[in-house]
Image (tube, rainbow, N blue to C red):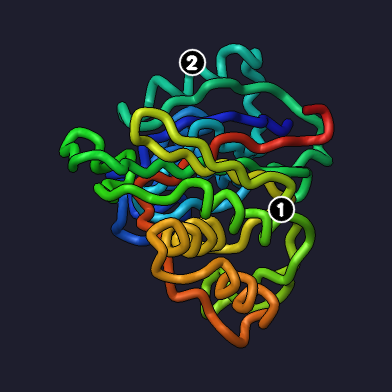
Amino acid sequence: MRVKCIVSYDGSQFYGFQVQKKLRTVQGEIQKALKKINEKETIIHASGRTDAKVHALKQVFHFDTEKALPASQWKRAINHFMPNDIYILDAQYVDDDFHSRYSAKKKEYHYLLNQNEYNPFQTDYIYQYGRKLDIELMKEAAKIFLGEHNFASYCCYDQYGNTIRTLYKLDITEENGIVTFTLVGNGFRRYMVRHIVGGLIQVGAKRIPKERLLEMLESCGEKKCLFKAKPQGLYLSEVYYEED
């Protein structure tokens, strides 16, 4: 039987989502819990990986099990063994053809930035930029990324393969000095959100013109974006499936 779970986690004390030897990861903690419940090794499959220090509001993963618990008890059982920085929001049985990664249609990320004075209580959750940005300039530059593009210049240097993605939404809002970047797309390569946001910050700080971002995008990887926003402040907000 296949179980789909929605999980929220504070990424500040993790070395990312994916299992790594001798390092604390979200997948590692969840699989340790499932081993106790299923009494054998259980591998989970997530909608995607998040990097060290990156948070998730509604990450999705699935696993296969032979243990016939009522669906409502899976949430309670897994949370019983969870540390206090991971929480299972929902668990339900799904069809065997459901896959957390390959069945996903869209993903939504949020990135938070503080223009105000440094706040030590926010440092793991909101990027402490500490200076004013030109929001209107960034909004204008954000339009460059909408639609289908080859994002090779805006993702991890050592990643090859298909870098063509569609960005449906890139909104920038500001309230009380906190800037929120909202990105919705059909998929994101590693560091893609952080490179896009990093580039927009440079435009908002008036260090580069928006034309520089377009030039990098159109180069399809020949001209790499060297601006990468810090992981603190990045949240995987939602994963959308056919039924959503």
- Position in image of residue 59 (x %, y %): 56, 37
- Position in image of residue 60 (x %, y %): 60, 37
Query: Which residue is found at the position 70% from the left and 77% from the top?
Result: 218
> Residue at label 1?
167
- Position in image of residue 10 (x %, y %): 36, 36
Query: Which residue is found at the position 49% from the left and 56% from the top?
Result: 197
**Depth check: 111 or 94 in front?**
111
The answer to which quarter of the image holds residue 154 is: bottom right
**Depth check: 27 or 186 in front?**
186
| Amino acid type of the residue tagged 1 in the rendering | Leu
- Position in image of residue 209 (x %, y %): 51, 69
Which is nearer the N-term, disc 1 or disc 2? Answer: 2
74 over 54 or under it: above or below: above
**Depth check: 30 or 159 in front?**
159
**Which label sits on residue 76?**
2
Q: Is residue 85 visible?
A: yes
Query: Quick one: quadrant of the C terminus?
Result: top right
